[in-house]
Amino acid sequence: MAPNAAFTGAGPAGRPPAGRRRGPSAGRVRLRWLGVSGWEIVIGRGHRRRSILFDPYLSRMPFTDAQGVAEHGIPLRLDHEAVEAVTSRHLTGAPELILVSHGHFDHMADVPQLLARPDWRHSRIRVLCDATVSSLLAAMGTPRRRLADAVLVGGGEHLRFDGYTVEVFRSLHSRRPDYGYFAPGHRLVPPPRPSVLGDLVEGDTLAYQVSVVGGPSILLMGASNFAEREIAGIRPDVAAVPMTTTAAVHRYPGRLLAAIGNPRVLIACHHDDMVTPLTGPPGLLAATTAESSVRRLAAAGPGSHVVAPRHLEAMDVDALLT
């Protein structure tokens, strides 16, 4: 199946999805998949164009042992050249916000480098995160003035920005088949500088809904699990759904989609191999998109339009919703 292919789930008696709640767009909204659960959201056009980053992990470093199991003690090998190459060639510019779901390496490890970019030094960038991520950012040498712009959140916040809002939800991390998961823990004060993957602990896992005034709402999740009662009744137009290991989570993603009303558009993510460089040949990256994840979403989301994104390629949200 080619990436960006779409499925339309067949609901009972052709029942439409519970979405269809979006008003006319106030301007172009684009999504760009950064791999894993990372996204760039671009709002508007021309000189009024702004962007938001979610879990921007670009280094794509090794993380498993010889048996393919995520290993806490593997050295933290950030790829500064790759981060700069992807940022300068593909991202829109300095984001207004960086939203971080939790503290693991594949979600926040590159945020300090992004915040320290000389090209972005005159732009104010706020980071929405929990106390653990804030502590880890400090431990990794994030510039002090950037740390001062961190906005600590824990779930329940609904924040208004220029032309959009961000709602924060308490969420949960994915579970392995043995019910455990990688690097749990919290850091309420900055620890020693992290040197191995396991030093970047989870903290609290959060999900975010970005709602553009007069435009679409987009649900962003960092892991393939969720706190059902925290998000029950929200109605995003688009949901980016992580599809990592879910065997231990009851009826995922079916329960998720029922809770949020079968959004009109579902985008599979966090199902790539996490190590193929974003700067490598396009064919290698295309091969990391898992067809089975898209088919599972199509089966779980009756009537939804299911999309398999390509790494670093922009998708027009209006077109997806048409």
Image (cartoon, rainbow, N blue to C red):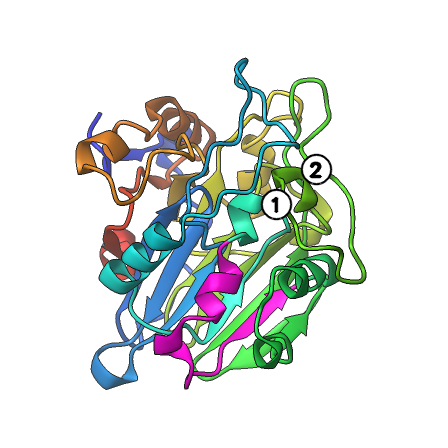
Based on the picture, tell me whether residue 128 belongs to the magenta stretch.
yes
Q: Going from the N terminus, do you reach mark 2 or mark 1 first?
A: 1
In the rendering, at what x and y percent does residue 91 appear? 30, 63
- Of the residues shown, which amino acid type is indicated by label 2? Ala
Badge 2 density bin: few <14, some 14–19, many ≥20, Cα 10 Å: some
Start-end of magenta stretch:
110-129
Name the disc covering residue 104, or none: 1
Is 15 inside the magenta-drawn segment?
A: no
Q: CA distance from mark 2 to mark 1?
A: 7 Å
**Residue 48 higher or lower than 296, as above or below:** below
Front position in the image: 187 or 220: 187
Please tell me which residue is depicted at 78% across the width and 44% down the height of the picture: 185
Compared across the picture, whether 158 is left or right of 63 comes to right
Position of residue 279 relative to residue 301, above or below, is below
Q: Residue at x 27, y 75 (%)?
A: 27
In the rendered image, the vertical position of residue 115 relative to residue 179, given as above or below: below
Residue 159 placed where, x, y %? Answer: 60, 76
Residue that badge 2 annotates: 183
Nearest the viewer among 114 and 206 is 114
